[in-house]
Amino acid sequence: MGISYDRKAELIAFDETKTGVKGLVDAGITEVPRIFLVPSPENLNSDQELSLPTIDLKGIHEDPIRRKQAMEEVKDALGSWGFFQIVNHGIPVDVLEDMKKGVLGFFEQDSEVRKQWYTRDRSANRVVYNSNFDLYSAPVTNWRDSFVCRMYPNPPQPEELPPPCRDILLEYSSQVMKLGCSILELMSEALGLEPNHLWNMGCATQLQVTSHYYPPCPQPELTMGITEHTDAGFITILQQDQIGGLKVLYKDQWTHVHPIQGALVVNAGDLLQLITNDKFVSAQHKVVANKVGPRISVASFFLTDLMTQNPKVLEPIKELLSEDNPAKYRSTTGKEFLDYFYKKGLDATPALTYFKI
């Protein structure tokens, strides 16, 4: 890298453009700038060709036998992979397609219009658009731009949302919220608890919808779309397009999550692993960069409340503990956990490690 490399100055210069990675690509760059370079080239191929479990949710509300089958599959998938894909989930294909179009519309509007939404202040704004939430703390900058909207419990007014995705964001979020609640019920049952147990614990108190835009990259092996990390919340429901690039760490091997038309990807986050005392795992995952693009994905994070007054205490569920299986994590609050997660930024060390007993 050489002594002359002033990383901080280059990060500030990049941030101040307010046009993100897309701005670099629009300017016609042919080489990946230094701030994005990974220490060693990324293997763009899969280490192994295994398939993520795919769970069919058809009939789970009408047929008790189908429901039990789906519940067992959720239990197996979250105990081993920490990830699964779902089909027949109830969100119409046109809603999924319109959501992807809305995200594309936001990022491909005139850069001067897009800049108006650019900010690093997560607390003051309903919509936060920037590139790399951990830009100043991460060792390597990722090849993606994102915008984040807090959609539940107090959805924004339509005029608070960007026009290209205003209506669809409200529609998509309400459908994802409903689906998330169904999945939390299956997870509760898989743990041998009442169906509403995880809901009552506050596992869906907040819904944050994050839309990612991964521009085409001239040298994809030299950078990353998203660094290896785990998610902070309880569950994430991800919609990805057909370009692919998501990889999950399973049995110490990186495995591609091949996109299935109309399917959604569900994964456990750190807080779910904490409250289930490792019964469900929050798996490491990453996104590789690609010469083809843009790749669009929409991640819906189910989070706890972040109130400072009377915050909900999060700790391993008492019913899952025994003399042989004592609590592995200390008590925390959603705010403490997420503050630590955001301060740490995305890296290969799970935030959970800090909360272990």
Image: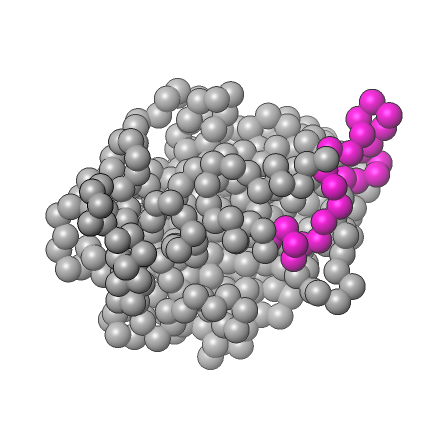
Q: Which corner quadrant holds the C terminus?
A: top right
Residue 277 appears in the figure: yes
Tell me if 280 is positioned left or right of 283 in this view: right
* Residue found 85% across the figure and 28% down from its top: 322
- Per the rendered image, the range of residues in magenta is 316-338
What scheme was used to colour the molecule?
Answer: one colour
The answer to whether any part of residue 302 appears in the image is: no
Residue under the point 43% across and 52% down: 137
Residue name at image x 75 percent, y 67 percent: 309
328 in relation to 173, above or below: above
Q: Quadrant of residue 176?
A: bottom right
Q: Position of residue 14 (x, y in %)?
A: 27, 60
x 53%, y 77%: residue: 157
Horizontal and vertical percent for residue 285? Answer: 46, 36
The verdict on residue 333 being magenta is yes
**Left or right: residue 298 compared with residue 150:** left
Residue 246, above or below 255? below
* Place of residue 216 in the rendered image (x, y in percent of width and height, measured from the top left): 23, 47
Q: Picture quarter containing residue 175?
A: bottom right
Indicate the position of residue 72 as horizontal and vertical percent values: 68, 28
Report which quarter residue 191 is drawn in.
top right
Q: Nearer the viewer, residue 188 or 307?
A: 307
| Quarter containing the N terminus | top left
* Relative depth, front residue between 264 and 28: 28
275 shown above or below 112: above
